[in-house]
Amino acid sequence: MKRTLIGLLAVCVLALAGCSTGIPDSGANAGENFKQDSPQFFMASVGDRVLFAVDQSTLGAEAMSILDAQAGWMMQNGEFSAIIEGHADEQGTREYNLALGARRATAVQNYLVSKGVAAGRLRTVTFGKERPLEICSTEACWSKNRRAVSVVSAGGTS
Amino acid sequence: MTPLVKLLTVKLVAAVFMTVTAVPALAQTTGPLKIEITEGVIEPMPFAAPAFVAQNSNARQLAEDLAAVVAADLIGSGIFREIPRAAHISGISNFDAPVQFSDWKAINAQALVTGAVTLRSNGQIAVKFRLFDVFAQAALGEGLQFVGTKEDWRRMAHKVADAVYSRLTGETGYFDSRVVFVAETGPKNARRKRLAIMDYDGANVRNLTDDASIVLAPRFSPDGNKVLYTSYETGMPRVFVLNLNTMRRRALDDLPGMTFAPRFSPDGKTVVMSLSEGGNTDIYTVNVASGKRSRMTSSPSIETAPSYSPDGRQIVFESDRAGSQQLYIMSANGGEARRISFGKGRYGTPVWSPRGDLVAFTKINKGRFHIGVMRVDGSEERLLTASFLDEGPTWSPNGRMLMFFRETRGANGAPSIYSVDTSGRSLKKVAIQGFGSDPSWSALLK
């Protein structure tokens, strides 16, 4: 429990410092080059991912604001569907992390549905700790690997 | 003395047959030399394994190699210690000549393994061995002979070592066995995985699948003919079963959602595994033949990593129902579960010992990972290893050793397979090329 609290604090500090929003740094500028109804725009300007605290799947305030934007974009671009990928950092056992990734992906799915996105346009998949983005073995990397990424594409989810 | 000739056939996986014949023992078994395997610290028994006698000149290398594999097997168990060749006063140049016990007593070898190899004109080899209790100056059991193809020479060495182990401990050995695992290549953020199989000691690695999609956590069937595993070939984790004889694979069932963490029941007829649906992960059983499924748990928490008791009547699994990952045991029919892990930290990946007495697990505490064992009532927890990331224990067929994988820290972090005995004394890296994870140990081969 203690570790979880420290993890939460670490994420909050990072959030206050304005870093690690999950949106690429060049997002605002790069986004202008993409059509509003493109997956590239979704990734660069809306923000395709949210981050989680250690061993948690609850959505923080920052995650919710990114998901509000995702929901808005999904509502405007009805031909798109999304696969939500849930991921975990390397500090857990393989099976548990698969289950944890599923929880995270579902937390995002449920939130988007609550904001009006049709459930049939969303599908979830867990990758557990199989697909780390960052490869160092410190909190700086782990915090970016504990993520749920909405991968949008035109057409159905399957 | 009347020669006692026993004949029994041993089926190899490749459908080759080996015959086992007894050769006459030189002396009656007297006071039995025995090493008791206990969980405390024991003094390894010193033994000598001089080069086997080459019965023809082109068998000389084979004779060296056989003795070396037998010795490596015995040393790796942690309960035997080899007296190095350099210390030997004499060698064995004639397999049937009387043993000069005084030469072996003088260097304090308590057990002596002698052997002889014949390379036959049809390409087959015959391996004979005898085991002696040096201080009692007597043979321990009958001599045995194995006949097989030259390609199977390592299996014959393992069978010799299993016979020695079993005569000296009173328990079955574990050397003639295989391990399925995940062979990994590539950088940490683009790892490619495929299923592979090897001898228990890391020799004879063969790939079982390509690396087109992520594969995870293979598990042997009790008869060793099938392997359960989790594959992403449909885009999401799903349990597959691979038949090792036909190399055909199929999805185990058509459950909706994601399935993973499968294991066979001891009779091989049922698979217990996790199904994740709507963000909730629970445990189900699936009948292998009919596909009929039963739900074993139904709580909003994570229930995963189930493993049957050897009698098939209970299932040990992990759950975070009490707020963090802990170990529980329930009936194989589901229902109430009792918690067995109460120490500090989180516990996962429980595996029931084939002896029935212990549960092996992964423990995470203060940022360190451990492989440990506890009794099935949760008492006498012992941590056998500690590192940045140790995970996924699997039992040797006789329940005396464990294999697991250890991942190193940092950007170049990569997994390797290790083995350790249940007292934690004989930690050893299994020598394979490349990265390996998720080992699953077979039963003793037939």
Image (cartoon, rainbow, N blue to C red):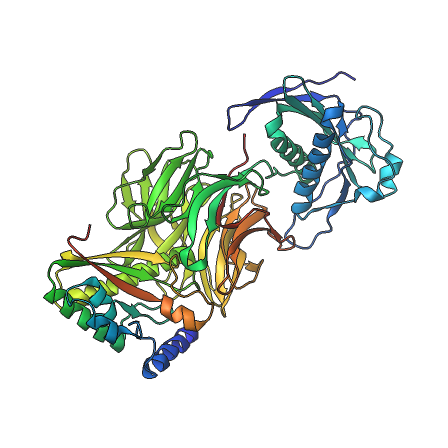
Q: Residue at x 28, y 46 (%)?
A: B234
Q: In the rendered picture of this protein, how many numbered marks are placed on residues?
A: 0
| Residue B7 pos. (x, y %) | 62, 19
Q: Quadrant of the N terminus of chain A?
A: bottom left
Q: Quadrant of residue A97?
A: bottom left
Give the farthest residue toward the front.
A33
Q: Is residue B323 visible to the viewer in this orientation of the structure?
A: no
Q: Quadrant of residue B191?
A: bottom left
User: Does residue A50 appear to the left or right of B100 in the view shown?
Assistant: left
Q: Is residue B274 above or below residue B98?
A: below
User: Does residue B101 appear to the left or right of B252 in the view shown?
Assistant: right
Q: Is residue A75 visible to the viewer in this orientation of the structure?
A: yes
Q: Quadrant of residue B127?
A: top right
Given residues B363 and B310, the one toward you in this image is B363
Q: Residue at x 75, y 38 (%)?
A: B33
Given residues B359 and A94, the one toward you in this image is A94
Given residues B261 and B185, the one toward you in this image is B185
User: Does residue B55 appear to the left or right of B289 in the view shown?
Assistant: right
| Residue B10 pos. (x, y %) | 57, 24
| Residue B347 pos. (x, y %) | 45, 61
| Residue B405 pos. (x, y %) | 52, 53
Give the farthest residue toward the bottom.
A16
Given residues A62 and B276, the one toward you in this image is A62
Q: Is residue B8 above or below residue B34?
A: above
